[in-house]
Amino acid sequence: MAWLITSARCAAAAAVLAGISAAAFAPPAVAHEATSVDITNAIFASTQADCASYENLYASQVTDTQQDRKLEGEVHVTAHDDHCVIESNSVPNHDTGEGSGRDFVAPVTETSGSFTIPRNPKLASSSTALEQRSYDAILLNGVVVDILSAGCYRPNGNRVDANGNVAIGCRTTDKWLLDPLGPGAGFGADNHHAHTQPNGQYHYHGNPMAMFDDSPGADGSPVIGFAADGFPIYGSYFKDASGTLRKAKSGYSLKSGTRPSSASDPGGAYDGMYVDDFEFTDAGDLDACNGMVVNGQYAYYVTDSYPWVIKCFSGTPDTSFAKGRP
């Protein structure tokens, strides 16, 4: 399903977004009329890197399978001279909860978010690490990417599991931070590698398993969202220098051998349970942030292995991605 763009009534059309004031949507500097587009279970088509290409209203109707109830997703993309704004209620364009093995910590709840995307992002002189206090990206179905967990190896902590891990309370800089998609991590992600925060906000920890598939277009997978630094996020497929369409490969590899074993180290084989089980070896297509340049455009790519979507920011993340205080 291709994304639609028409031509001049953005503010009026925005009023159909339930719970968001029409006044919040002043006519953009680049005027387009937005027609509401149903993206329920849609496979996107566009590979345009400029967020302005997606200016429109989008809607979806999905099922919370854990609570057996219907949900309605709402996304509004507006374009301005130098940036776009993506506003959503955090409900995805696909069903939620299937395959999680247990109920989420809280039912999926409509959660308003507004994110500013620079239209002409620049590569920075050095990368910026991901932070637990900020979201990493916003996808075009209105759901954030939040790669890092707050769990780690802490055998003397509260509510420790059989591996000596705690699910919450750890900082980004703590040793042996859990990868939410690692074996035995126990975060209860569904078939879309997502679950909810305690406030019910649905968010991804990896490949959304939506918006793109294994039948890419002639130029590869579509854009499925934008990182906090403004660079686009594509699905997994790209056209390499030989003209072959194939999946982008991560440059990270599992370390060989076993982890140190002590009061503060978990021991055991490096198996991907922890972020520190991996090291950047430059063994794939992508750089240390999980991005690369294709046809002159820097972008991040979804991968089948760690770090899944993004490891760090190659540009400067916008402050609109900071998480609100609980």
Image (cartoon, grey):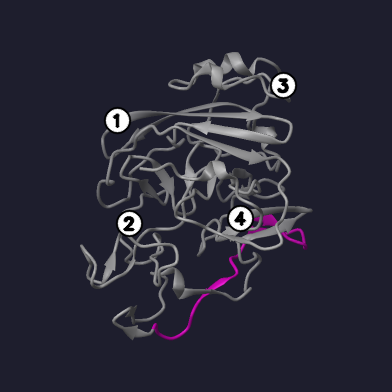
**Residue at the front extreme of this rendering:** 325
Quadrant position of residue 129:
bottom right
Q: Nearer the viewer, residue 81 or 45?
A: 81
Q: Which mark is residue 301?
A: 4
Residue located 63% across and 31% down the image: 3
> Residue 177: where, in percent of width, then height?
40, 67
Q: Nearer the viewer, mark 3 or mark 2?
A: 3
Q: Which residue is mark 1?
A: 69
**Secondary element type, mark 4:** strand
> Residue 179: where, in percent of width, then height?
41, 63
**Discs 3, 2 touching: Cβ within 8 Å:** no
Q: CA distance from mark 1 to mark 2?
A: 23 Å
Q: Residues within 10 Å of mark 1 (few under 14, many from 20)?
A: few
Q: Residues within 10 Å of mark 4 (few under 14, many from 20)?
A: many
Counting residues from the N terminus, which is met first, the one under dot 3 or under dot 1? 3
- Identify the main secondary structure in magenta: loop
Q: CA distance from mark 3 to mark 4?
A: 30 Å
Q: Which residue is mark 3?
A: 31
Residue located 63% across and 69% down the image: 284
**Secondary element type, mark 2:** loop
Question: What's under tag 4, amino acid-wise?
Answer: Tyr
Looking at the rendering, the stretch of residues picked out in magenta corresponds to: 236-259
**Discs 1, 4 touching: Cβ within 8 Å:** no
Q: CA distance from mark 3 to mark 2?
A: 43 Å
Q: Which residue is mark 2?
A: 187
Q: Nearer the viewer, mark 3 or mark 1?
A: 3
